[in-house]
Image (cartoon, coloured by chain):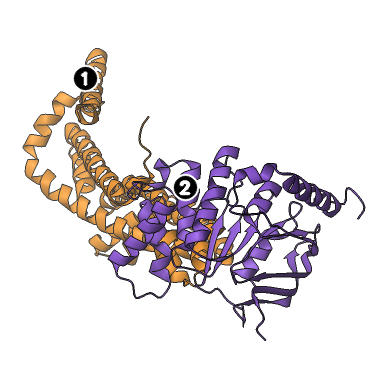
Amino acid sequence: MSSEALIDIKGVTHAYKTKSGPLPVLDDLNVSVKEGGFVAVVGPSGCGKSTLTRLIAGLMKPNEGEVWLHGARVTSPRSTVGMAFQNPVLLEWRSILDNVILPLEIVPTKLSRKEKEARAEELLALVGLEGFESKRPSELSGGMRQRASLCRALVHKPDVLILDEPFGALDAFTREDLWQTMHALKAKEPFTGVLITHDLRESIFLADEVVVLSGRPATTQYRLPVAFEGARTIDHLYTPEAAEMLNVLRHQIEIAQGRVAA
Amino acid sequence: MIRKIGVPLAAIVIFLILWELLVWANGWPNYKMASPSDLWPAFWQYRELFLIQGWETLWRTVVGLGLAVIVGILLGMVMGFSRTMREALYPLLVGFNAIPKATVVPIIALMFVGQHDLNTILIAFMISFFPIAVSVSIGLSTLEPEYRDILRSLGASNLTIFWKIALPKTLPEFFGALKVSVTLAFIGTNLMEIVSPHGRGLGALFDSGKTNADFPLMFAVLLALAALGIALYYVVVFLERTFAGWAERPEH
């Protein structure tokens, strides 16, 4: 039952149990990401985007439908997934280096302590955190903490990276810096990614496909392939093609919010 | 360093001077209120007793406190991880804690007649485990779900999550509660020592001062208790710095 897609979400329907009855959040949702692909998921607030990340990570099971990773059905968490959230959730009692190493202490690995450190240092250097290895998280800025969080998500070489609004709490300039860091990371550390975001510019800058979800319960409303010529730079966001894409996406979000008719 | 030791020391000296002045200005006799200058002779006269009884009080307090730490952490874990257990146990614990321990002392003393050490340790434990249980349960139940998800998404077991994240993250709250519990445990130990006949420890020394109308001795015992309390408190502060020093933000 394997297909080309590395992440395959098929007909997923999910509802949360609440005091006032079931709250449907996902309705027959279909998303697939091919190996090495990077899909951004946008949609109105509270439409179930974070539920989607938890389903892919195997942290919960959908009521209906199936989630497949690498041709295997996801029923429980697997160590081939890396996650980063809006809150970097670094452990305050560990140094930055030890925070990045954390996944290597959990997943089965033959690496020695030295090799683990080397692996973490390599990633930290890649995101510009060289020299901060022994610092505590509280000594770093928000953007730096998020960089460390990305390193932790990638340290065990997961083949799927799930990003749940990782740049949402950062200021605009820091955010653009981190977008470029993401491209640098992707070039060195190939992964298949799903990015949840509220930022349309971010979605077209980082992803090769943008999926717009409808309002709750969310279903796939629109797909936009993103293609720019050559390596992406912030300049691409100021081209007519980008403006056109953003326009289309903005319109789709308004439809999803129910503000305009389809 | 001068500030860290000098300031509290100066505060103690000033306090003793004010105490002395208060007694002197009012012309209070010994039996109304002893002054610090009356205490040194009492300390000196009974120096051996103070050492022996002080040790009795100290070790039983520490053992009672150790028991409170173990039981408090276990209760806190049970309540922190299970909402049902939290809802079931909180009213019981609050009710138990609301019972004045002075009323429990005779019950315990009768229950284990003659086992003075055990009785004392039990009361010290009963009076001091509550803050620890509450703080650990709050620390664990307020753990942000993302912290758990980071490890869970890698396939970590609940035990691993507890050791790697939940426990260290709860340490600052735990030590905050332990500071409260230290002083409570001393109260518990002394309750039993004073109330129980044939008691030992500083409480019994206080009681004998009362019987013999030796008022400076009674005040001297209170001071010795305060000194022990301060000493144990700083042991906890030291442990906190060692194990949860990361929670202290650098001063700006």
Can you say whether A63 is above or below B218 in the image? below
Label 1: few (<14), some (14–19) or many (≥20) C-alpha neighbours in 10 Å? some
**Quick check: can you spot residue B126?**
no
Amino acid tagged 1: Ile
State the image quarter where residue A85 is shown. bottom right
State the image quarter where residue A160 is shown. bottom right
Q: Which residue in the protein does label 2 denote?
A: A145
Q: Which residue in the protein does label 1 denote?
A: B17
Instruction: Check the picture and name the quadrant holding the N terminus of chain B.
Output: top left
Q: Nearer the viewer, residue A137 or B178?
A: A137
Residue that sits furthest to the right in the current view: A261
Q: Nearer the viewer, residue B84 or A187?
A: A187
Q: Position of residue A66 (x, y in %)?
A: 70, 78
Can you say whether A237 is above or below B20 in the image? below
| Chain on which label 2 sits | A
- Identify the chain drawn in purple: A
Q: Position of residue A257 (x, y in %)?
A: 83, 51
Q: Which mark is on residue B212?
A: none
State the image quarter where residue B23 is shown. top left
Amino acid tagged 2: Arg
Residue that sits furthest to the bottom in the current view: A1
Q: Position of residue A34 (x, y in %)?
A: 64, 71
Can you say whether A58 is above or below B10 in the image? below
Q: Is residue B42 left or right of residue B169?
A: left
Q: Residue at x 74, y 54 (%)?
A: A46
Q: Secondary structure at mark 2?
A: helix
Q: Is residue A245 left or right of residue B46?
A: right
Q: Residue at x 30, y 50 (%)?
A: B195
